[in-house]
Amino acid sequence: MTGESQADEARRCRRFGWTALAAWSLFGLALEAAHGFKLAVFLDDQLRHTLLRLAHAHGVVLALVVLAFGSGAGALYADDPPAKARRTGALIRAGALVVPLGFALSAVAPHEADPGFPVLLVPAGAVLLIGGLARAALRAWRSRTF
C-alpha cells in the first residue's frame, strides 16, 4: 500500500488489541456469571469448563501481546519498509485471534473426554503467533534504534 507507515501498523495493533481485550474480558465476565448462577451447561461438563477458561485466559493475554507489539512497532521497524511491520503484526494478530477461538469453538460440542475438532486451530494459531514473535525478536536484535 502506498503511503503506509509503521504508525499504521501500530494503529491496527492498538485497535485489534483493545477490541480483543474488551471482548475476551467480557467473555470472562460471562463465564463468572455462569459460575455464579450455577448454570449446569457450564458447571457439569469439566472439559467445556476448562476449554472456555483457556479461551478467556489466552484471549486476554494475547490481546496484551498485540498491544505490546503495537506500542513498539514504530521504533522496532523504524529503519525498515512498512511492509515488514505489517507482515509481523498480521502474524501476531492472526495468532492472537485463532488460538483463543480454537479453545472456545472446541468447547461447543466436545465429545466425551475429547474437545471438538476446532481445537486444531490452537496449534495452527500458535505457529502463526510464534512466527510473528520470532520476526519481532529477530528485528529487535538487528535494530540499532530499538
Image (cartoon, rainbow, N blue to C red):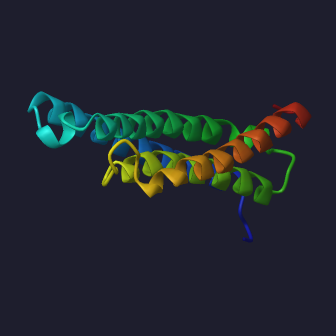
Q: Is residue 39 visible?
A: yes
Q: The N terminus appears in which quarter of the rendering?
A: bottom right
Q: Is residue 2 above or below residue 54?
A: below
What percent of the width, then of the height, locates residue 53? 35, 34
Instruction: Identify the residue at the far bottom of this view.
Output: 2
Q: Quadrant of residue 142?
A: top right
Q: Is residue 140 left or right of residue 43?
A: right
What percent of the width, then of the height, locates residue 80? 85, 51
Q: Is residue 114 left or right of residue 141?
A: left
Instruction: Identify the residue at the far front of this view.
Output: 112
What percent of the width, then of the height, locates residue 52? 34, 40
Residue at 88% x, 36% y is 143
What percent of the width, then of the height, locates residue 37? 8, 32
Q: Is residue 144 visible?
A: no
Q: Is residue 36 above or below residue 7?
A: above
Q: Is residue 59 above or below residue 9?
A: above
